[in-house]
Image (tube, rainbow, N blue to C red):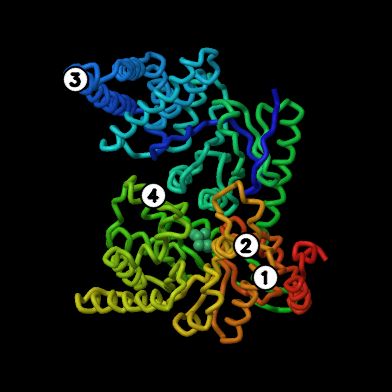
């Protein structure tokens, strides 16, 4: 039966494919496809994890037996029996093997998927006692996952062809090219990276806001995505046909042939529209009144330099270096690894400038080290970005040294996230100096850099003069600027309707920052999602912005807006939008 689910539109386009579910789990686990040659090893990993938990439960049973009935109540013994029984449950064991063997899921993914399948059956049970056993099953699965945490995983994700072939073979589909769409309660930004090689044609998550980092990575992959779809991961079943309308933020499950045909048509139309934008690739981004505009790319990994070049970016305006630090169970990349990664990005941009942002770990970009101290009360307001770097100067120095060394290979700009205090600026500048002095002393080659700051905390925008004095360039991180101005967690779908780039307070901070930078002859850009939103291009141009940094996939669409714009007309209009009580209404005027 066809039904639809509504969420937030984050990445445009239409995807049609079969659902692959990623079940949520309280234990942070990786999800990736394995090579067929790794199947037995993955099965063995689950077995070892399970054996470890069985041993632990047996030991507990023995301890209990040695205690008197007063200290070890009967219920406790019964519970252990249930847990041991669930661990050996054939459906669980057989199911896990099935996901590994037939779908090439890694061990942890197989385990959480099977848990989800069995848990759904528990939910449907009439008997309240049996229904409650679901919690036990979740508990022991968690134990197994934790027991597996210490083991090395087989690692290498496989290519799309292998994963799809396994999928089609198992479902006995003739078409070995069936597109797959990912449905999950939540996908961590690092998991998204694993999937970046193009395994999935689209994404849906229950949680997340439009500028959550998971949404940002989905957008950078240029595939349709819907977040904040609340119960999607419970309503959609494994292998369902799903349509993701990334423009409308709608997910259609089990579509009828008529609906399917309609969306296939729309999909083709969109492809044609996109194809026609390609003609703008070599056209310089200049407005009708001759204003030159720089269109830069935001990237997450060095390899993204390729798509930036292909999209005609004139440089990288934001390299989110923290993606090199994520999904590594806390093992940070050392100086050499970082140096090589930055160098790859720089060389990939073939002489064009590359802005490397120092790590912005924290909030919705955890480092996945699973340590309890990772859990902070309010991570968006906690130890994040530069605060994290300054809290661990030796880690920060490692990154600074790597960037300075990479600067030998091209034009490098270094940018610092989340600065608000003069003391943070001073400490940062001192550490940059220290990194330079160390390299010089050691006789290690390093290159010149321009140093910039992100303006993404209202306090920074309101004390801009300090930033103008200390930095060569500034970049507005509107994603966070909106979050912190409006006190809206950007990753929380329940308040997503209040996350408003056009709130007069946000516009005021953006407009004043641009104006002050221009007045001081200081280079300023916007590198938040606002820069790639075509509905904002005219307004930002009217406010005086001439440098936009965005996902490569957005560059041509924004260029089209630039080519049609006349900034001399846009300027007074932008001022009227800025003064308006309701800027959204004024924007349409
Ligand atoms: C921003 O905050 O606008 C930004 C570009 O940085 P990030 O999205 O990585 O926080
Ligand atoms: Mg930010």
Label 3 vs label 2: CA separation? 64 Å
On screen, residue 95 above or below 284 = above
Nearest to N terminus: mark 1 or mark 3: 3
Nearest to N terminus: mark 3 or mark 2: 3
Q: Which residue is mark 4?
A: 375
Q: Position of residue 24 (x, y in %)?
A: 47, 35
Which label sits in the foreground, 1 or 3? 3
- Residue in the picture at 59% in, 68% down: 548
Q: For this view, does 445 lie left or right of residue 93?
A: left
- Residue in the picture at 73% in, 41% down: 266
Which label sits in the foreground, 4 or 3? 3
On screen, residue 468 above or below 229 = below
Q: Which residue is mark 1?
A: 540
Q: Which residue is mark 3?
A: 67
Which label sits in the foreground, 3 or 2? 3
Q: Position of residue 76 (x, y in %)?
A: 31, 20
Q: Which residue is mark 2?
A: 530
């Amino acid at each position: 039966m066809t039904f639809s689910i509504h969420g937030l539109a984050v990445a445009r386009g239409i995807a049609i494919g079969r659902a692959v579910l990623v079940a949520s789990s309280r234990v942070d686990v990786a999800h990736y496809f394995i090579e067929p040659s790794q199947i037995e090893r993955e099965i063995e990993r689950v077995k070892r994890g399970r054996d470890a938990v069985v041993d632990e439960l047996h030991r507990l049973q023995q301890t209990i037996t040695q205690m008197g009935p007063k200290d070890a109540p009967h219920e406790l013994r019964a519970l252990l029996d249930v847990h041991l029984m669930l661990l050996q449950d054939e459906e669980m064991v057989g199911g896990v093997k099935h996901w590994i063997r037939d779908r090439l899921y890694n061990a942890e993914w197989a385990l959480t998927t099977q848990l989800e399948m069995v848990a759904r059956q528990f939910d449907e049970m009439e008997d309240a006692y049996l229904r409650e056993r679901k919690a036990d099953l979740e508990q022991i699965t968690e134990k197994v996952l934790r027991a597996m945490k210490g083991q090395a995983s087989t690692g290498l994700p496989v290519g799309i062809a292998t994963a799809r072939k396994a999928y089609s073979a198992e479902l006995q589909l003739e078409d070995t090219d069936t597109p797959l769409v990912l449905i999950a309660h939540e996908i961590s930004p690092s998991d998204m990276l694993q999937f970046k090689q193009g395994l999935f044609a689209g994404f849906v998550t229950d949680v997340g806001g439009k500028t959550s980092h998971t949404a940002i990575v989905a957008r950078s992959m240029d595939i349709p995505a819907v977040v904040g779809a609340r119960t999607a991961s419970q309503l959609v079943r494994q292998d369902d046909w799903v349509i993701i309308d990334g423009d409308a933020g709608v997910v259609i499950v089990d579509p009828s042939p008529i609906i399917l045909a309609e969306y296939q048509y729309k999909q083709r139309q969109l492809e044609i529209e996109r194809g026609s934008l390609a003609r703008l690739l070599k056209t310089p981004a200049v407005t009708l009144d001759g204003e030159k505009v720089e269109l830069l790319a935001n990237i997450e990994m060095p390899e993204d330099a390729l798509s930036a070049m292909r999209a005609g970016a004139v440089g990288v305006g934001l390299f989110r270096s923290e993606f090199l630090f994520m999904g590594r169970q806390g093992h940070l990349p050392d100086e050499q690894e970082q140096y090589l990664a930055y160098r790859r990005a720089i060389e990939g941009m073939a002489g064009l400038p590359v802005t490397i942002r120092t790590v912005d770990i924290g909030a919705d970009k955890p480092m996945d080290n699973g340590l309890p101290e990772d859990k902070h009360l309010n991570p968006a307001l906690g130890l994040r970005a530069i605060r994290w770097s300054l809290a661990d100067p030796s880690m920060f120095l490692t990154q600074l040294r790597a960037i300075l060394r990479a600067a030998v290979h091209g034009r490098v700009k270094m940018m610092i996230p989340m600065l608000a205090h003069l003391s943070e600026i001073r400490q940062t500048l001192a550490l940059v100096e220290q990194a330079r002095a160390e390299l010089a002393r050691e006789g290690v080659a390093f290159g010149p850099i321009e140093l910039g700051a992100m303006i993404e905390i209202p306090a920074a925008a309101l004390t801009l003069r300090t930033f103008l004095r200390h930095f060569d360039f500034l970049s507005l991180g509107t994603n966070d600027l909106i979050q912190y101005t409006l006190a809206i967690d950007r990753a929380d779908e329940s308040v997503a309707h209040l996350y408003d780039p056009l709130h007069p307070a946000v516009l005021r901070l953006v407009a004043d920052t641009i104006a002050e930078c221009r007045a001081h002859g200081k280079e300023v850009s916007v590198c938040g999602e606002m820069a790639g939103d075509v509905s904002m291009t005219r307004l930002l141009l009217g406010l005086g912005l001439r440098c936009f940094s965005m996902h490569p996939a957005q560059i041509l669409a924004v260029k089209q807006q630039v080519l049609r714009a006349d900034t001399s007309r846009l300027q007074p209009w932008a001022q009227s939008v800025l003064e308006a009580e309701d800027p959204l209404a004024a924007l349409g005027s």
